[in-house]
Amino acid sequence: MKEANTTGFAIIRIITGLLMVYHGFEIFDSTQMQQYASWDSIKNLPFPAFWAYLGKGAELVGGILLTIGFMTRPAAIIIALTMLFICFKIGNGKFWYDAQHPFLFVLLAMIYFFMGPGKWSIDNNRK
């Protein structure tokens, strides 16, 4: 990749990671977490609070890892699987309309899974 492209690629990775951290940070808001656990698509699962916390925890941890570029590929899989669950279970698979944002996070995560972290990452500095 050319230098400008790798810089842009890294900036997009960092912003994507920070957006996931922002969404995952809701794990510390018990009122919001209770609301998520009460959604029909979650409360019908066994242990709904567990699933709500697991999802938000995955967003937070995956976002931190993606932001710093550490264990980027596993983080990308965590994010992609979480967002696929949101898109197809919570959003009823309407990725062309209601669940566009989670599906876009899936696509971004898959780019970093296949391409790696790019520059400004711990993964690249460990080589």
Image (cartoon, rainbow, N blue to C red):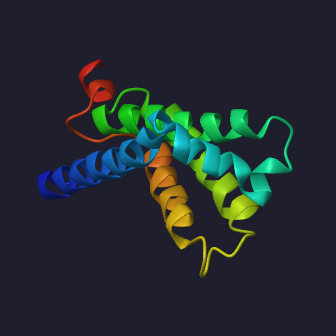
Query: How many numbered markers are drawn?
Result: 0
Residue located 43% across and 48% down the image: 23
Which of the two residues, 88 or 57, is positioned nearer the viewer here?
57
Q: Residue furthest bottom?
A: 97
User: Where in the figure is residue 42, as x and y percent of width and height?
Assistant: 76, 50
User: Where in the figure is residue 5, as x and y percent of width and height?
Assistant: 20, 57
Q: Is residue 124 above or below residue 7?
A: above
Question: Is the C terminus in the top left, top right, bottom left or bottom right quadrant?
Answer: top left
Residue located 41% across and 39% down the image: 25
Residue located 26% across and 32% down the image: 121
Asked whether residue 26 appears in the rendered view, the answer is yes
User: Where in the figure is residue 68, as x and y percent of width and height?
Assistant: 29, 32
Residue located 42% across and 34% down the image: 72
Q: Is residue 70 left or right of residue 99?
A: left
User: Where in the figure is residue 108, as x and y percent of width and height?
Assistant: 45, 57
Q: Residue furthest top?
A: 126
Q: Is residue 111 above or below residue 91?
A: above
**The quadrant where residue 12 appears:** bottom left
Q: Is residue 43 left or right of residue 59?
A: right
